[in-house]
Image: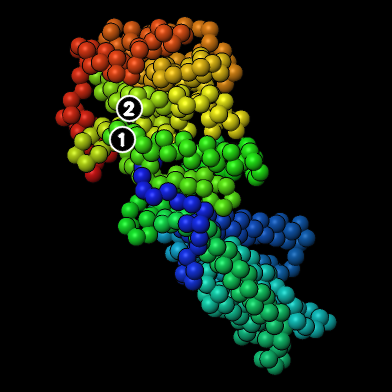
């Protein structure tokens, strides 16, 4: 499956815009249904294990106790029921593990599984008559307990829960009637079957209440996911700053992605510190939304919810990040690396001209895909925490102001690590790290976080040509190592100069035809 990433200005949303749609009928979100389907599979697997253990332990006990032949015949009847239950349970478990299964179908099968389990338990419990000294009296059985448990695990409408629960607990009376038909139990009046199991029918009522509560909670989640003009459809991923959701514009039916920044990442959940962080977020998001390079992430919208959660609304992209590209396909040829880096430089050139630096250039924040008919089109992502170097000191950015370390250690320039004054050349250092990763499939410096930081400060990088078997033009290697210089004034002067130098390298080409062929071969359609 291709990665879906964010890009993506429209009128800015305020907390008042984030109200819930009144009276709308909402279904339980699909991702919650998938989680419930996963839990159903676990319950089915647990059922198979319990049936198997019961059969094995029963057989061992019968052997150890030298039971009479009639008891052994009874155990054989139980074994047949257990084996059938194991097969059905494992089949349901395997079905729920298929990635392409509709979770709603799986959950409907779960209700049928409840009925089947009720039948198996009803036959097992009532296969033989109890001793004559034990009178018929109302009792709660595992079937009633299972009905309540399924209502909590399998989101379903109260009507479906009621119907499945009634049929399931009715398997106990069926089991008694089967025992009577076999001539092993004369329990008197047929009404005794209902008298004995009416507590299970009461538990079905409890199951309906539980199902109503679970469904209402799911609908409240769906409500909470409606932000402004967008409806959140499902979780795409999560990271240190927050979660990313797939979203749809309710009027335009336009797919989008929404990145939520958790309130705790602001440094304070309430008070002046949180309000100051929100102001910085809005100012920096407005700066990011002013960028117009076709290779820069474009914000559709941004805002702050009433609970101080920050969010960006961005375009949903099809393709992959450079991180995924290298991890899945290996090092990138020099010609393609130059093609990618020049597009990154075009994005950074505009940002730097406006006095903005990205501060977190890395392969995971660079997306490559197809834009219209153009293959290998690059988008630089996550401009949400850009820093203005023209208007305020370093400590006043959103990230540094909330105690966060801006950037990723493996791609962090020495002056950023030392919290010194930075300019666009800090981004060019990160571009050099990205180029190194593309060419070699390895980081400039390996190791733990603090170790990597120390090596960025002190060690000279090994030339990339010594860490890959792919040919690297000497001019490209010298340019990458220049970007990785410890002192900013030893690096290329600007993103434009770096792009021009990359374009002047001979003997490393990557044509549009090559790019189109690569995408057709690796991600057709």
Is residue 342 visible in the rendered image? The answer is yes
* For residue 515, above or below residue 413: below
Q: Which residue does the image show at 51% across and 38% down from the upper left? A: 281
Image location of residue 30, percent across then percent down:
46, 58
Q: Which residue does the image show at 47% across and 33% down from the upper left? A: 385
Image location of residue 501, percent across then percent down:
27, 13
| Farthest residue, direction bottom | 189
Which class describes the residues within 10 Å of circle 2: few (<14), some (14-19), or many (20+)? Answer: some
State the residue in front, 318 or 185: 318
State the residue in front, 49 or 8: 8
Q: Which residue is mark 2?
A: 350
Is residue 328 visible in the rendered image? The answer is no
Q: Which residue is mark 1?
A: 292
State the residue in front, 97 or 502: 502
* For residue 409, above or below residue 257: above
Q: Which residue does the image show at 48% across and 47% down from the upper left? A: 303
- Where does the C terminus fall, quadrant-wise? top left
Q: Which residue does the image show at 34% across and 34% down from the upper left? A: 291
- Where does the N terminus fall, quadrant-wise? top left
| Horizontal arrangement in the rendering, residue 348 relative to residue 447 (left or right) | left
Image location of residue 160, percent across then percent down:
52, 75
Q: Secondary structure at mark 2?
A: helix
Q: Earlier in the sequence, mark 2 or mark 1?
A: 1
Which class describes the residues within 10 Å of circle 1: few (<14), some (14-19), or many (20+)? Answer: few
| Horizontal arrangement in the rendering, residue 125 relative to residue 383 (left or right) | right
Determine whether label 2 and label 1 are within 8 Å by CB. Answer: yes
Colour option used: rainbow
Q: Count the labels in the image.
A: 2
The residues bearing labels 2 and 1 have C-alpha atoms spaced at a distance of 8 Å
């Amino acid at each position: 499956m291709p990665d879906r990433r964010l890009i993506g200005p429209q009128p800015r949303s305020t907390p008042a815009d984030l109200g819930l749609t009144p009276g709308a009928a909402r279904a339980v979100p699909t991702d919650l249904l998938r989680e419930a389907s996963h839990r159903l599979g676990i319950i089915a697997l647990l059922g198979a294990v319990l049936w198997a253990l019961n059969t094995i332990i029963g057989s061992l006990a019968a052997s150890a106790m030298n039971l009479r032949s009639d008891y052994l015949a009874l155990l054989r009847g139980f074994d047949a029921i257990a084996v059938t239950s194991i097969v059905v349970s494992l089949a349901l478990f395997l079905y729920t593990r298929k990635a392409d299964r509709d979770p709603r179908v799986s959950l409907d099968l779960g209700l049928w599984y409840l009925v089947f389990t009720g039948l198996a338990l009803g036959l097992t419990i009532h296969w033989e008559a109890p001793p004559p000294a034990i009178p018929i009296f109302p009792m709660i059985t595992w079937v009633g307990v299972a009905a309540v448990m399924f209502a909590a695990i399998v989101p379903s409408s109260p009507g479906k829960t009621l119907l499945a629960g009634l049929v399931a607990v009715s398997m106990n009376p069926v089991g008694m009637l089967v025992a009577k038909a076999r001539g092993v139990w004369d329990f008197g009046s047929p009404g005794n079957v209902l008298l004995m199991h009416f507590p299970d029918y009461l538990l079905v009522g409890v199951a309906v209440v539980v199902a109503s509560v679970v469904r209402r909670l799911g609908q409240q989640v769906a409500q909470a996911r409606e932000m402004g003009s967008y409806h959140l459809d499902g979780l795409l991923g999560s990271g240190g700053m927050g979660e990313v959701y797939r979203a749809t514009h309710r009027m335009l039916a336009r797919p989008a992605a929404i990145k939520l920044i958790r309130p705790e990442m602001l440094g304070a959940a309430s008070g002046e510190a949180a309000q100051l962080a929100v102001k910085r977020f809005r100012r920096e998001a407005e700066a990011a939304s002013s960028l117009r390079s076709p290779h820069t992430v474009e914000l559709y919208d941004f805002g702050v919810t009433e609970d101080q959660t920050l969010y960006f609304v961005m375009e949903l992209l099809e393709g992959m990040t450079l991180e995924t590209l290298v991890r899945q396909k290996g090092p990138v040829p020099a010609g393609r690396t130059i093609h990618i880096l020049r597009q990154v430089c075009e994005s950074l050139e505009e940002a730097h001209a406006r006095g903005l630096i990205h501060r977190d250039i890395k392969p995971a924040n660079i997306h490559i895909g197809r834009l219209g008919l153009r293959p290998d089109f690059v988008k630089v992502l996550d401009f949400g925490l850009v820093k203005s170097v023209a208007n305020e000191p370093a400590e006043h950015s959103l990230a540094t102001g909330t105690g966060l370390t801006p950037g990723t250690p493996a791609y962090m320039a020495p002056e950023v690590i030392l919290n010194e004054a930075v300019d666009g050349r800090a981004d060019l250092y990160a571009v050099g790290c990205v180029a190194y990763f593309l060419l070699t499939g390895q980081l400039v410096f390996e190791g733990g976080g603090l170790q990597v930081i120390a090596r960025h400060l002190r060690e000279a990088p090994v030339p990339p040509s010594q860490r890959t078997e792919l040919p690297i033009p000497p001019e490209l290697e010298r340019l990458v190592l220049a970007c990785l210089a410890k002192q900013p004034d030893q690096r290329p002067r600007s993103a434009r100069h770096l792009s021009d130098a990359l374009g002047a390298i001979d003997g490393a080409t990557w044509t549009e035809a090559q790019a189109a062929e690569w995408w057709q071969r690796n991600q057709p359609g």
